[in-house]
Image: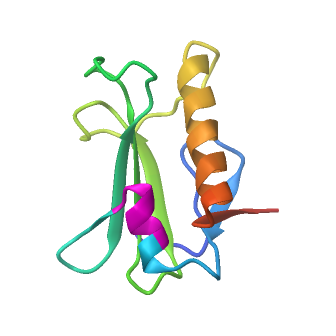
């Protein structure tokens, strides 16, 4: 998957982009780890119970220039992309995803694209 100016996950109709005023320390403070190539990566489980190891994960990578990003929701082992928006059987995961994204917007890392 390549870096894009605006990105979304499978099934979601909402697109996000890196906020123009975002700084590297904001991503680090939020929990992003800096990769060997200088990009910022976040892997966050979409389950409110931290003991659940089978939860899908939100994987997001922001390019080191802080202009482009890529994101996906994967299975618990991170190997396969999945769509949590196909039906109501993942309602709790959808709510957690929306909460994380709203929190990143509030933190000044991302903004929603209209």
The answer to which of 2 and 66 lies nearer the viewer is 66
Q: Give the range drawn in magenta.
A: 26-32
Q: Is residue 12 left or right of residue 64?
A: right
- From where the camera sits, is residue 12 visible? yes
Q: Would you say residue 108 sits in the magenta stretch?
A: no
The answer to which of 108 and 53 lies nearer the viewer is 108
The answer to which of 45 and 81 lies nearer the viewer is 45
Task: Provide residue 60's location: percent of width, then percent of height.
Answer: 42, 56
In what quadrant of the picture does the N terminus appear? bottom left
What sort of colour scheme is used for the picture?
rainbow
- From where the camera sits, is residue 1 visible? no
Position above or below: 55 against 21: above
Task: Check the image and name the residue furthest to the left.
Answer: 36
Task: Check the image and name the residue furthest to the right.
Answer: 114
Task: Provide residue 26's location: percent of width, then percent of height.
Answer: 49, 69
* Residue drawn at point x = 64 percent, y = 82 percent: 20
Position above or below: 84 against 14: above
Task: Provide residue 106's location: percent of width, then percent of height.
Answer: 67, 56
Position above or below: 10 against 5: above
In what quadrant of the picture does the C terminus appear? bottom right
* Residue drawn at point x = 61 percent, y = 60 percent: 107
Position above or below: 92 against 111: above
What is the chief secondary structure element of the magenta stretch? helix
Q: In this view, does 41 lie to the left or right of 65?
A: left
Task: Provide residue 104's location: percent of width, then percent of height.
Answer: 58, 55
């Amino acid at each position: 998957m390549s870096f894009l100016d605006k990105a979304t996950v499978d099934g979601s109709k909402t697109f996000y982009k890196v906020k123009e005023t975002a700084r590297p320390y904001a991503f680090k403070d939020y929990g992003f780890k800096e990769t060997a190539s200088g990009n910022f990566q976040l892997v966050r489980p979409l389950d409110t119970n931290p003991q659940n190891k089978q939860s899908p994960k939100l994987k997001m990578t922001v390019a080191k220039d802080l202009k482009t990003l890529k994101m996906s929701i994967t299975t618990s082992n991170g190997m396969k992309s999945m769509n949590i928006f196909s039906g109501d059987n993942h309602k709790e995961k959808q709510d957690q995803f929306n909460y994380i994204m709203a929190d990143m917007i509030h933190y000044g890392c991302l903004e929603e694209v209209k």
